[in-house]
Amino acid sequence: MKIKELWIYPVKSMAGNAVTSATLAARGFLDDRRWMLIDENGRFISQREYAQLARWQARTDEQDLVLEHLDTGEQLRIKEARADEGPLVEVQVWDDRFSACLVESISGEDLKAALGIPCRLVYMPEDFDRPLDPRFAKGEEWVSFADGYPYLVANQASLDALAAEVGEELNMQRFRPNIVVEGPAAFAEDNWQALQIGKEAFRLPKPCSRCIVITIDPETTKKNPSVFRNLAEMHSLNNKVVFGMNACWEGSGEAVLTVGEEVVVPV
C-alpha cells in the first residue's frame, strides 16, 4: 500500500492543489484550510450553497494568496493574506465558534465582484487554537478551518467501487481528501485505527460522514444525486453515509509526506 495522491486546500471549499510532497503540522498540512470565506454572520461559506467555488483554486505566494478560476484563468491576488495581526472576528464552522483574523487587504466588494458571492476572507494564524472535538481527541489536538479533523485519508479502491455502482467515472476531489492511498481492497479503511507512513504515525478516530457536496462534479459543478444515494446504499455506518477516514498526525517538529511512500496498517 502506498500514497497515490496528496492534496492541499488553502481556502476551505475551493479546489485543491495536487502536490508531490506536503509538510505535516498538527492541525493539517501546512497552508491547508488556513483561509476561509464567511458570510455577514461569520458562518463559513462552502460549495453546499455556492457550487461555483469548486472552479476556483487558491495557492500561496509567500505572504500573498492567489485565487484563479480554473476555466477562465481569471486571477485575484490578495496581498498580505497571512493576516496574523488582522482584527479578530468570531467565525462559525458547523457547531464550533471561535476567533479568526479578518484579511483586510481585500474588501467584501472585491471578493463579491470576483466570486459572485457576498463574503469576507479570514485567516487562521499558527498560534490560534481550535480544539478537536473532545469526544474524539487524544489530549490536546487542534484543527484548522476543516470540517472537523486535521487530515482525511481516502482509498482509491473505494472510489472505484462507488463509481462502478453509479455507472460513471468519479473524481476523487468530490471527497476532498488530503491523502489518497492505493493498494487495499475497497472500504478496507473501515477497520483501520492507525496508519504508519514512513516514520510518521497517524491516528484514525472515526470514519468521515458525508453530505451533498459529494454530488457536485468538481469539473463541471453539476450535481448528480445518485452519487450520494448509491454511497448511502452501499456504505453507511451507524446511520451515517461515510467515505474515508478522519486522521490526526501523532508526530511533532518538521516532517514531510511524499507521493509513493509506503503506507502500513500497524498490527
Image (cartoon, rainbow, N blue to C red):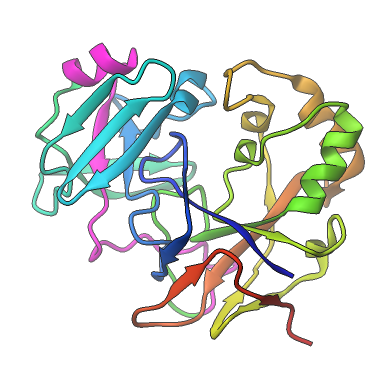
Q: Nearer the viewer, residue 137 or 145?
A: 145
- Looking at the rendering, the stretch of residues picked out in magenta corresponds to 109-138
Q: Which residue is drawn at the image coordinates 81% and 50% (left, top)?
A: 158
Report the number of numbered marks. Answer: 0
Q: Is residue 28 left or right of residue 90?
A: right
**Where is residue 79, by image quadrant?**
top left
In the displayed structure, would residue 132 be above or below residue 217?
A: below
Q: Is residue 44 left or right of residue 231?
A: left
| Magenta stretch, main secondary structure class | loop
x and y, in percent, of residue 128 in the image: 26, 61
Assign the N terminus to one quadrant of the image: bottom right
Q: Is residue 109 left or right of residue 260?
A: left
Magenta span has 115?
yes
Q: Nearer the viewer, residue 64 or 3?
A: 3
Q: Which residue is drawn at the image coordinates 66% and 75% (left, top)?
A: 262
Q: Which residue is drawn at the image coordinates 59% and 50% (left, top)?
A: 177
x and y, in percent, of residue 164 in the image: 89, 35
x and y, in percent, of residue 54 in the image: 49, 27
Q: Nearer the viewer, residue 174 or 181?
A: 181
Assign the C terminus to one quadrant of the image: bottom right
x and y, in percent, of residue 248 in the image: 54, 70
Q: Nearer the viewer, residue 178 or 207?
A: 178
**Where is residue 73, by image quadrant?**
top left
In the displayed structure, would residue 214 be above or below residue 61?
A: above
Magenta span has 172?
no
Q: Which residue is drawn at the image coordinates 15% and 49% (left, top)?
A: 63
